[in-house]
Image (cartoon, helix red, strand yellow):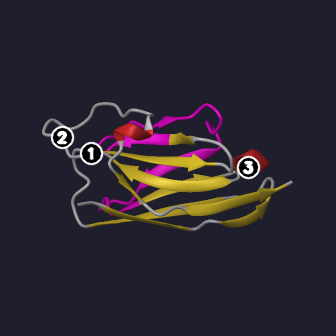
């Protein structure tokens, strides 16, 4: 059972930066895909960035490429989402997520929330223009 807990959200001005963290506990994240999703008011949940554990492969949504960076600490127990040049359209609840464990691991991660089994409670990011 993977437990995820996000933190670091807040209210900022457009153009500012925030760094979100996702603390991982309960089980290894080896051989799983890890991801950040977000959900704006009145909209569906959308992928922000994904990456298989144990690799440097990261895929980003077009809307955040060049502005957001997904990273992990060396121990693999914390995920980060560095968000720069924030825009009002980045306002959303941000979630980290993990897939089930798979024997052969994952070479690439999907972008559909249905592929992710474990979710944090979310952290709110509000960007005012």
Q: Are marks 2 and 1 in contact (CB under 8 Å)?
A: yes
- SS assignment for the magenta stretch, majority: loop
Q: Relative to residue 59, is residue 98 drawn left or right?
A: left
Residue segment shown in magenta: 49-78
Q: Are marks 2 and 3 in contact (CB under 8 Å)?
A: no
Pointer 1 residue: 32
Name above or below for residue 9 compared with residue 98.
Answer: below
**Of residues 14 and 121, the one drawn nearer to the viewer in this rendering:** 121
Q: What residue is drawn where x is 43% and y is 46%?
A: 35
Q: CA distance from mark 2 to mark 3?
A: 36 Å
Spot the residue most to the left: 103
Q: CA distance from mark 1 to mark 3?
A: 30 Å
**Disc number for residue 85:** 3
Q: Quadrant of the N terminus?
A: bottom left
Label 3 crowd bin: few (<14), some (14–19), many (20+), radius 10 Å: some
Q: Which sits earlier in the primary sequence, circle 2 or circle 1?
A: 1
- Residue 118 in the image: state x and y as whole percent: 34, 54
Spot the residue most to the front: 42
**Disc number for residue 102:** 2
Q: What residue is drawn where x is 40% and y is 51%?
A: 97
Secondary structure under badge 3? Answer: loop
Quarter-of-image position of residue 23: bottom left
- Residue 110 in the image: state x and y as whole percent: 39, 32
- Residue 12 in the image: state x and y as whole percent: 76, 63
Residue 54 drawn in magenta: yes
Secondary structure under badge 2? Answer: loop
Regarding residue 56, the answer to whether it shows in the image is: no
């Amino acid at each position: 059972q993977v437990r995820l807990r996000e933190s670091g959200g807040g209210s900022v001005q457009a153009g500012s930066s925030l760094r979100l963290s996702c603390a991982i506990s309960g089980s290894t994240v080896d051989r799983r895909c890890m991801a950040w999703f977000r959900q704006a008011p009145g909209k569906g949940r959308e992928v922000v960035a994904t990456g298989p554990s144990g690799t440097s492969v990261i895929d980003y949504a077009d809307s955040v490429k060049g502005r957001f960076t997904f990273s992990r600490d060396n121990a693999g127990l914390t995920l980060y989402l560095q968000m720069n040049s924030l825009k009002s359209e980045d306002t959303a609840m941000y979630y980290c997520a993990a897939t089930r464990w798979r024997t052969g691991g994952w070479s690439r991660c999907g972008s559909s929330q249905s592929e992710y089994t474990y979710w944090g409670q979310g952290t709110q990011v509000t960007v005012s223009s």
